[in-house]
Amino acid sequence: MKKLILVLSIILTSRAFAQTPYWSEHVAPILYNNCTNCHIEGGIAPFSLVGYEKAVAYAGSIKSATSSRSMPPWPADLQYQRYAHERVLSNEEISAIANWVDGGTPKGDTTKAPAKPELKTGGSIISPTRNLKIPDYSVKTTTDEYRCFVLPTGFTQNQFLTAIEVIPGNLRVVHHALIFHDTSSKPLQLDAADPKPGYLSFGGTGSSTSELIGIWAPGSEPYFFPNGFGIKLLKKGNIVLQIHYPGGVNNVVDSTRVILKTTTTTQRQVVIQPALNHNAPNLQNGPLYIPANQVKSFNNKYDLPVDVSVFTVGPHMHLIGSSIKAFGVTTHKDTIRFVDIPKWDFHWQRSYTFRNVLKVPAGTTLRGQASYNNTSSNPFNPSNPPQAVSLGEGTNDEMFLVYCWFTLYQPGDENIVIDNAVLKNVSKTSVLKTETTRIYPNPVSDFAWVTDVRFAPGNYQWKITDLTGKTVAEGNNNMDSGKRCKIPVVEIPAGAYHISIRQGNTYYSGRLLKQ
């Protein structure tokens, strides 16, 4: 029945868009359901898409970003595996946006438009056990900052975590967050040694006893464990919240919260561990070392001694990572697919939950494959010229981890449904081909060049904004015969920025790193 409904929906959608779609009836619902979590006033995105006027102003950019599937950000390859609560657009939705833009962006009947979304500020977990807030922290940084905040739970007896949610205090500056639980005094010592609230730490918390209990990225929903499952939290422990604040932020206050729902009733214990990692003997062709100006790949593996039930996976690399993949090979040579990210982007890392709990039998060999691009062609390379990179937790170091949320298997676990929503059609065959755009060098020190096949020789307007939306530079220039825009950045402080270029009805927006 679900398949029949999906087929009918696709047929009706195709008929509806045989003529030019309207913003009110067709495009606004797509944007409001998929994009305005971030693209809203006060959100982390550099511009809002709430309202017809906003959508028209960025119509070309919307078409380009959705056609290439760079937006909404969902790096995992959905041809490899499907997941719970996917934040993606169907081929039909992408086509509707493209046809609307190509058809002149008609407004339609505004009485049929959905209600405008509002910025979400409250939590979704009902009757939480703890609602923990970091001290108000004034973010002032020119480069990426990773700051850990120690939040005592106050638990006097052991608990089981059944749901967790992160509420960013300021979506403009909270890029992503890792949530740990720790029972040692080390995080408190590090906090006391730093004069500011919290303490600086890039890779982990600086404590060997910290255990990962959650990941938050823009667009993430609260994480609810299936009934009867939970992560054990020992009494007198601390939550250590590591927040990534991007560069280019000046005196913006953050007050992020972590919401926990726990129970003292014993649950089947879920643990989060990097089953695939960069340490021997797990890493097969180590050590993890990537010489300057080289592209290099690594493999790791782990032989599973017992049957386990897997809920979620979370791959992790740093800035020069280019791809990562994880799967299992059973004793019968069957392949169990976990995740494949062909174009790794550190800034959009997240966890991926399976639609059903995944049984992985004893004897399965877990395998990971990762590639690293330590050349100047990697726009996220933190060093220019490239420098040799080795294993470590620093910004300029690298890692190769695949975390798994799992528990010991019991018969019937594979029948536990986490998400039974009808899957969207995301087959590659009908995805629109997008324009080719390139920013180089990136990071940049003096001038950035932007090329886009949509541009034509002539005048264009450009603007650079920081991640709070403040304009730091703008101007007008003439496009050269190679369809290249030359953008001066010499006087801009080091940090992360958004760059936008407009030429008539053609609009481009991208990320720029100033070193």
Image (tube, rainbow, N blue to C red):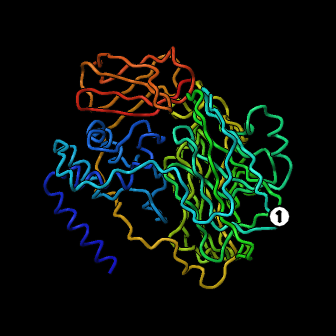
- For label 1, the crowd category at 10 Å Cα-Cα, with few meaning under 14, some 14 to 19 and many 20 or more, is few
For this view, does 427 lie left or right of residue 146? Answer: left
Q: Residue furthest front?
A: 127
Q: Residue at x 71, y 51 (%)?
A: 278
Say which amino acid is labelled 1. Answer: Thr
Q: Quadrant of residue 62?
A: top left
Q: Quadrant of residue 338?
A: bottom right
Q: Position of residue 131 (x, y in %)?
A: 66, 56
Q: What is the total number of numbered labels drawn onto the structure image?
A: 1
* Residue for badge 1: 156
Mark yes or no: residue 312 visible.
yes
Location of the N terminus (image quadrant): bottom left
Q: Up-down: is 100 above or below 16?
A: above
Q: Up-down: is 81 above or below 44?
A: below
Q: Nearest the camera: 288 or 511?
A: 511
For this view, does 467 lie left or right of residue 35? Answer: right
Q: Nearest the camera: 386 or 240?
A: 240
Q: Position of residue 121 (x, y in %)?
A: 52, 50
